[in-house]
Image: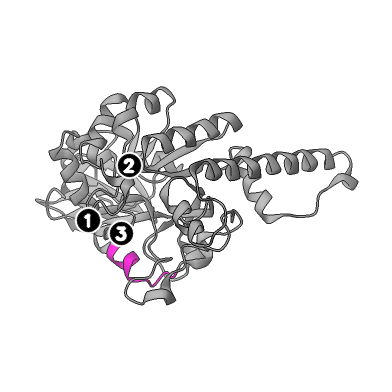
Amino acid sequence: MIAIVNATINTITQGIIEQGTLLIEGSKIKAVGRDIPIPEGAQVIDATGKVVLPGFIDAHGHAGVDEEGIGPAGWDYNESVDPVTPSLRAIDGINPQEQGLKDAYEGGITAMCIVPGSANVIGGEGVVIRTYGRIVDEMVIKSGGLKVAFGENPKRVYQGQKKSPVTRMAIAALLRENLVKAQNYLKKLEEAQSDPSKAPERDLKMEMLVRVLRKEIPLRAHAHRADDIVTAVRIAEEFDLDIVIEHCTEGHQIADFLAARNIPAIVGPTLTSRSKVELKDKTYATPGVLHRAGVKIAFTLDHPVVPVNYLPVTAALAVKEGLPEAAALEAMTINPAQILGIDDRFGSLEAGKDADLVIWSGNP
């Protein structure tokens, strides 16, 4: 048993407790509150003057698959020879000893969703992991959804190879074509339940897309520009899919559109240059605009585009531009946990949840 005592405990979902106590039994939070009896024999950590928060969550990054400082040997995030690669899995490219993951947990980011890059129209399956560990399989929390990409990146990659897609129309068409193939594959699977002779030959690409059609995992749609965001939503509605908008750089222009559809947005990276046309309207006001419209938001640093340990900095800059401080903390804790489907265990300090927490020397 571990007892953290005399702390300012921000539970995120149940208020702030001054001079609070948090009890940990095994890997779970046993109790949190004031005047909680300390069991005999418990290890006591005096957190006087310190702040206890849930571990922060970066909802979109490439740590472990884009290894820092070693060049092409560490570029395991884009299989940029085929625009349609749904069978790829980020877990198979993660090096758990990679510096970015170390920077994450040393910076208070205890969980990340690691996704493939955005070179391909369909990039592959992401994975939500704890940032600390030795064996990646032991770090896994759950699937991170299927990465798809709109806009400049697929166009640039495949224009250089002189093959499709080289337009936004082709990006949308390729995604639709493969979703239709997956619908046909799913129909055969369903028919095979009563007639095994109709079972299709196993197809790993289609199996992953079937999981999206069944809403077992969402589309994680890389989209910066407002028109690309709308195209991503249009396709999701056509096929009745769950979708999360990644980056959402121009989301402030269509905040009401996203809010009306209850579509969450993972915003960023904003602490970076306007390196391409899609980023010309980036602003730290975007999170606040989206929040006020009723959109559930989280942050991304798109690590290593911006180092993951700058997550609290990017949140602070969003606060400076109008996002309430409490909402900024939610965007690093309970919101990404809900978007990623891990809020039953992560994102707030409540009895029964994982003891995934950080003791800060002050307000981060």
Q: Circle 2 — which element?
A: strand
Q: Which mark's residue is nearer the viewer, 2 or 3?
A: 3
Farthest residue toward the front? Answer: 162
Within the image, what quadrant is residue 97 found in? bottom left
Q: Which residues are magenta?
A: 95-103
Label 2 sits on residue: 298
Q: Amino acid at mark 1?
A: Tyr
Measuring from the top left, give residue 118's x and y in whole percent. 45, 54
- Spatial distance from mark 2 to mark 3, Cα to Cα? 17 Å
Residue 243 x %, y %: 49, 37
Q: Secondary structure at mark 1?
A: helix
Dot 1 alpha-carbon crowd within 10 angstroms: few under 14, some 14 to 19, many 20 or more: some
Check the image and report above or below for 235 versus 270: above
Residue that mark 1 sits on: 310
Q: Earlier in the sequence, mark 2 or mark 3?
A: 2
Tag on residue 305? Answer: 3
* Residue 188, picture quadrant: top right
Where 110 sits versus 293, above or below? below
